[in-house]
Amino acid sequence: MISSSSNISPHSKRDDLLSGSVRFLALTAGGLLLLVIAFLFYESWPALHHIGLTRFFSDPDWYPTDNSYRLTSMVWGTIFASTGAVLLASPLAILSALFCHFYAPPLLSRWFRRMVELLAGIPSVVFGFWGLVVLVPMIGHWHPPGPSLLAGILILAFMIMPTIMLVAHTSIAHVPLAYIHSASALGFSRWSMMWHVILPTTKVGIFTGILLGLARALGETMAVLMVCGNVVQTPSRLFDPIRTLTANIALEMGYALGDHRAALFMSGLFLMGLVVLFVSMAEGLRHRNTYVATK
Amino acid sequence: MSRQSNHVQEYCLTVIIWTAATMVSIPFIWLMGDLLWNGWSHLSFNFVFSAPLNAGREGGIGPILISTLLLVGVCMGVAVPMGMGTALFLSEYTRHDHVLGRLIRGSLDVLAGVPSIVFGLFGNALFCQVLGFGFSILSGGLTLACMVLPILIRTVEESFRVISREQRLSAAALGLSKSTTIRTILLPAAIPGLLVGGILGLGRAIAETAALIFTSGYVDRMPESLMDSGRSLAVHIYDLSMNVAGGNPHAYATALVLVSLLFMINLSSSWIASRWTLSNQLPT
Amino acid sequence: MDLIQPTSHIIPDPDKRAGFRAWLPYQSTEPFCEPDAHLRANNLSIAYHDLQVLRNVTLEINRGCITALVGPSGCGKTSFLMSLNRLTDLIPGCQVSGHLQMNELDILAPTTDLLQLRRTVGMIFQKPTVFPFSIRKNLELPLREHGTHDRTLLQSTIENVLQQVGLWHEVKDRLDHPAQALSGGQQQRLCLARALVLTPDVLLLDEPCSALDPISSGIIEDLIASLQGSYTILIVTHNLAQARRIADHVAVFWSLEGVGQLVEHGSAQQIFESPKEELTAAYISGIRG
Ligand SMILES: Nc1ncnc2c1ncn2[C@@H]1O[C@H](COP(=O)(O)OP(=O)(O)OP(=O)(O)O)[C@@H](O)[C@H]1O
Ligand SMILES: [Mg+2]
């Protein structure tokens, strides 16, 4: 009978070392989120303490130097710009993913995908710059002033489209070939194959992609900072300039002190809260869905 | 459904889908054409390697390129080992439904969604102020590392996961130890995924602006150490276009450099990945 | 004879392997099947997440014999096999209770050296699972892992084992080519070779032929038959004719009220010609299952 103590293989030491270090790294990485939240709380504490939550919505306006801290219009700016972008980008992204898989000839499909990948890698500051020098003057020409919610929506849509498209593309690629073959064998048209086979099996993946896109749009800073005009107001039309929460932070962090700085951290915390909400929503949905699927 | 209406449906859908694809392509071509058209004429050896003058309207981007490389170096140097370790832990050392694994994965999922400007706030508070690194390349690089970690981990973990259960079971059935299984079967099979993850992270780090403005700062001089403030390419573009009147030409040129850099990274990664798969298994 | 030679090269110290290998099959001149229990399962039960799939299996597997495990889908045959080399440890939520013994070794004891156990008990699966590298590396990896690094020895062992599975002439010129380029049947034989390279005592074969075409399947079957006597073989098969052709003993599993159980166990002749249980009789005559 072999007892484990007399027979420790040379591998087990290496195994132990590996598992120890791997565990340590994982705990550090996993603790990062807590650290981020802790720091945001710590830094925004003065704002919560001196100003209080309600004043962020009840103060007359955003004049931090005059002790007036209303965030409402910037919250609206953020919400309008990102939902607009998602509404515009999602259909385009899904259709292009289908295009890649079922319509484009192989070579074109490869090039198209490659193009979208490159697009996904273009930095937001470059999008912002392009928007600033090309898109904004065009909109301004059409309907002054130019820097506007519309410019923000267009640029954001353009930016998050690749995110959604690539996720959708991957989930379509993961549809078992057998499904597609058996759908074809049943004489499905391309349309009904996509509608009845592809979209149902990939909807969770696509939805995840959309949520990722939404999160990216919500948190995007540079592009909106450069094309939206940064006027603190609740937009009533597409052509009104807006300021988003993110742009506000980027604009004012440089000189903010005391309560003002804390208020900016506070809005960061708020953004973070939104993201946590969306991510847990996506997760919950995914879990429910896999549960149903395995049943 | 009649055959006729089926045909009409099919036809309309085809038109819609091709239109969508065109609508996606046009802005891309426009953007790239614009960058090339306006950036190319300012691009020269001198531009890439000399120091900026007159707030960047003249001169070049030499020090900025160096700062960018240092930032990315710090970032990847920290993020890659951490990411690999965490991904291994998640896929090989915890059961899929394990509480700890779920917690870590969940927190990383949330972290992945955290806007970069929030990372900027966090980095400013932790690295610049509490740890006392000030506005420095070290602060910026560490902030970037926090930012790219989730995406790196997710891709790497995913590439471990696609390795089939049978492969793991047969490795175990041969009495291979965990470290050997990881080294000989999991890591090689995961290399394309690792590369993709690394490249995605690298791309994100190079492209980042918002997280850097308040961590590594604006200074456009040549950095002498990691404790110096340094301006990345992306921040340079932002500054030129927003804060410097007449900065657009050089902003174009810098954007062209930045985008080409990203494209080069992207292309080389897919080249490596495709070569890797080719040498390991026959194309089917 | 193509059988690979005695195994002292792999682990130099024979004492280390005492519990695993009390008996070396290759030293006998004639392969044989002995009426001597090599593996013993006593009241073995297996559950996945509290869902019991195998209950109270008590079974003795004789040394050097081929034992076929038959029974309808989902009655726990694979689970049973995997408990024998503790692969069940790797499956989330899988609990094995009862007693399993190989020679003197308590397989289920927490102190059992799993790496040793698994090299003494080889296993191949329904789907050929070659690793994504060259044929040579597929075979070298387990050898190196267990301490053989000598190049000539590696080469000769690989040649021997490939000869043994009848693959040598087919692949000798492309040992460094990717193993995944082989045909399914060849891959399965390579998997068998990879298991044999460690000179195990026990071979667990989980439906080794069911993913293959009839010709490859026949080749594998002949191969398994040729290993009779040299290894203690457990083979799961849905092909009763195959079980009849190659097995010395047959164990019939059945799922009663959703829980797998051992219904009958005996010599192949007895099971096929005069089954004691009604279920067995029905199953082998193709009425049920
Ligand atoms: N990983 C698992 N988690 C939960 N249940 C499982 C798992 N693996 C197998 N089972 C269940 O255990 C039961 C026995 O499975 P097992 O694979 O051992 O059957 P089998 O006899 O090998 O079937 P087959 O002939 O189809 O291969 C089945 O009901 C199966 O659903
Ligand atoms: Mg089975």
Image (cartoon, helix red, strand yellow):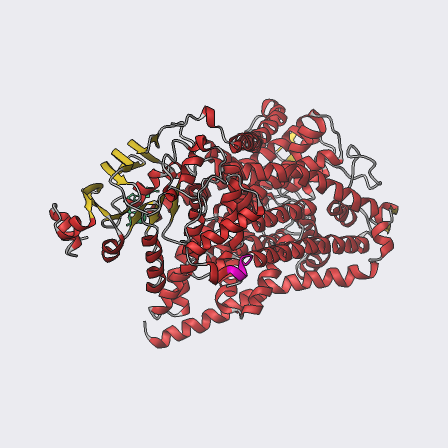
Q: Is residue A37 magenta?
A: no
Look at the image and tell me whether residue A217 can be seen. no
In percent of width and height, residue B180 lies at 53, 40
Picture mark count: 0
Residue sitting at 30 percent across and 48 percent down?
C235
Q: In which quarter of the image is residue A119?
A: bottom right
Q: Nearer the viewer, residue A274 or A54?
A: A274
Position of residue A217 relative to residue B223, above or below, is below
Q: Does the magenta stretch include residue C175?
A: yes
Position of residue C21 relative to residue B283, above or below, is above
In percent of width and height, residue C33 lies at 28, 45
Which quarter of the rendered image does ligand 1 occupy? Answer: top left
Residue sitting at 82 percent across and 38 percent down?
B223
Q: Residue furthest bottom?
A: B4
Residue sitting at 84 percent across and 41 percent down?
B222
Residue range in magenta is C172-177
Q: Which of B195 and A223 is in front in this view?
A: B195
In percent of width and height, residue A282 lies at 46, 44
Direction from residue B44 to residue C82 in the image, left or right: left
Q: Which of C179 and C50 is in front in this view?
A: C179
Look at the image and tell me whether residue C268 can be seen. yes
Position of residue A81 relative to residue C111, above or below, is below
Direction from residue B218 to residue B110 in the image, left or right: left
Q: Which residue lies furthest to the front in this view?
A: C29
In percent of width and height, residue C28 lies at 35, 43
